[in-house]
Amino acid sequence: MTRPYDLIIVGAGLYGAVIAQQAVGCGLRVLVIEKRDHVAGYCYSFPDAQTGLIVHRHGAHIFHTKQKYIWDYVNRFAQFVPYVHRVRARIGGITYPLPINLSTLRDFFGVSLEANEVDHFLSLQRGTFREPQNFEEKAVNLVGWKLYEGFVRNYSAKQWGVAPKDLPSTMKLQIDVRPSTDDRYFGDRYQGVPVDGYTPMIQRMLTGADLELGVDFCQEPHRWQKLTKGLVYTGPLDRYFNFRHGPLKWREITHELKVCSPASKLESPVVNINDDSSDCTRIADYSQLSASSHTGGPIVLGWERLTSVNDNERAYVENRVLKPVRFDEEEERLVKYQRDASREHHVYFGGRMADYRLYDMEHVVALALKAARSIVSQTSSGTLNHRV
Ligand SMILES: Cc1cc2nc3c(=O)[nH]c(=O)nc-3n(C[C@H](O)[C@H](O)[C@H](O)COP(=O)(O)OP(=O)(O)OC[C@H]3O[C@@H](n4cnc5c(N)ncnc54)[C@H](O)[C@@H]3O)c2cc1C
């Protein structure tokens, strides 16, 4: 049977776009189908109508990587503003630099420490739980009660919807205490934000591929599979398999954008709300993230909040923005779905939703470039197999 496409890619997010770009570059006939009415998935950006500032619809996105080949790759499709990301934590109306560093310790505790004094200072604060039974004990063992209560407790509870003492100790702890005054949020050499946003970057990557927007693959999977030799699926894994092992657990992220007066400008491009004064986790200031020269007029701020997801199907159909919750129970369910995925012929799963992982964009680019090599070679040789 003649199939009009070598590859159909489900999802015009970053993962799908990189695969499409590589496949088209190798001469494959590619169709990308996307259920939203626009490309770019979670990275979607647009110029705000009132201020002209480029805003990131689902939350501030900063591209950062240590890898030159990844940086060189994305720079083929976008011009990046030289940018160093800085974040502050708001606690009790005062903001402190993040990650916690010498300046944070000075402002928070009122102590002036040298780099070689930090470890001793923390050792006086640290908890002494022999075998931490939960996330709280693990964090207290690392930084002590005061830093934990200020910086970790409320923020983690808002992130996960569960008090840290009810979170497993196996959860990854992301608290960095730097024995320096380096307040760069990411230590990566390469970081930036595209001058005209992520949407044009993805559009450029998709050049040469056919694109159909507003099409939900899961409503007619067989129709699309008949048209192609191979399929790349970047949507949620449980939905592809019609929830046969039960739904995977997610938190929903909302990002409420508002035009505000210039007086509302934040102390840094992103301010985390680490106390319990608000249900918001962080606020982004697009006058500091946008490349468009800000004239001093109104600015755009974005408030991020997280809530639980009770109905996966509905959340997927409504294109909500989701963050995986990988506790032990989910890992077991995920393994079952991954086993099923490895048995699918001609279907390649990848990206944040199909892998059910919290990837940054650099990971997505690296994984997609690697997967594309294998997908292209298998598709070209006609020996399509399964997951790469
Ligand atoms: C709030 C937030 C902030 C972030 N900040 C950063 C940051 O600062 N730096 C960073 O590096 N990364 C950041 N990330 C991560 C980054 O957004 C992701 O790593 C990246 O966008 C994932 O790309 P993807 O293609 O895997 O997934 P997605 O962007 O989700 O793309 C998947 C696409 O598939 C489509 N799709 C799904 N199912 C179907 C279907 N059945 N039929 C058709 N289409 C379908 C979806 O609509 C979507 O467009 C952030 C993420 C979020 C949510």
Image: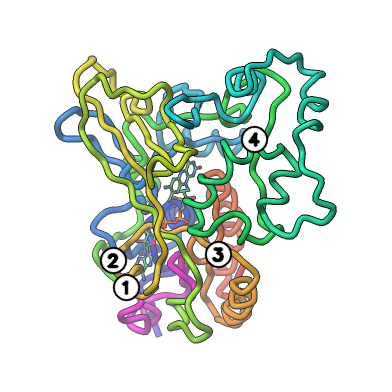
Q: What kind of residue is marked 2?
A: Glu
Compute the Cα span from label 4 to label 3: 36 Å
The C terminus: image quadrant: bottom right
Q: Residues within 10 Å of mark 3 (few under 14, many from 20)?
A: some
Residue drawn at (72%, 50%), measured in percent from left and top? 138
- Dot 4 lies on which element? helix
As for residue 233 lying within the magenta part, the answer is yes
Residue drawn at (60%, 23%), measured in percent from left and top? 104
Q: What kind of residue is marked 3?
A: Asp
| Cβ–Cβ under 8 Å for marks 1 and 2 | yes
Which disc number belongs to residue 314?
A: 1
Identify the residue under disc 2: 318
| Viewer-nearest residue: 235 or 281 | 281
**Ligand 1 within 8 Å, label 3 CB:** yes
Compute the Cα span from label 1 to label 2: 6 Å
Q: Is residue 183 above or below residue 232?
A: above
Between tags 3 and 2, which lies in front? 2
Identify the residue under disc 4: 146
Please indicate, yes or no, whether residue 383 appears anywhere in the rendered image. Answer: no
Q: Is residue 333 above or below residue 380?
A: below
Give the mark nearer the N terminus: 3 vs 2.
2
On screen, residue 192 versus residue 119, left or right, reads left
Quadrant assignment for ligand 1: bottom left
Q: Which residues are magenta?
A: 217-237
- Dot 3 lies on which element? helix
| Viewer-nearest residue: 157 or 220 | 157
Give the mark nearer the N terminus: 4 vs 1.
4
Q: Residues within 10 Å of mark 1 (few under 14, many from 20)?
A: few
- Dot 1 lies on which element? helix
Give the mark nearer the N terminus: 4 vs 2.
4
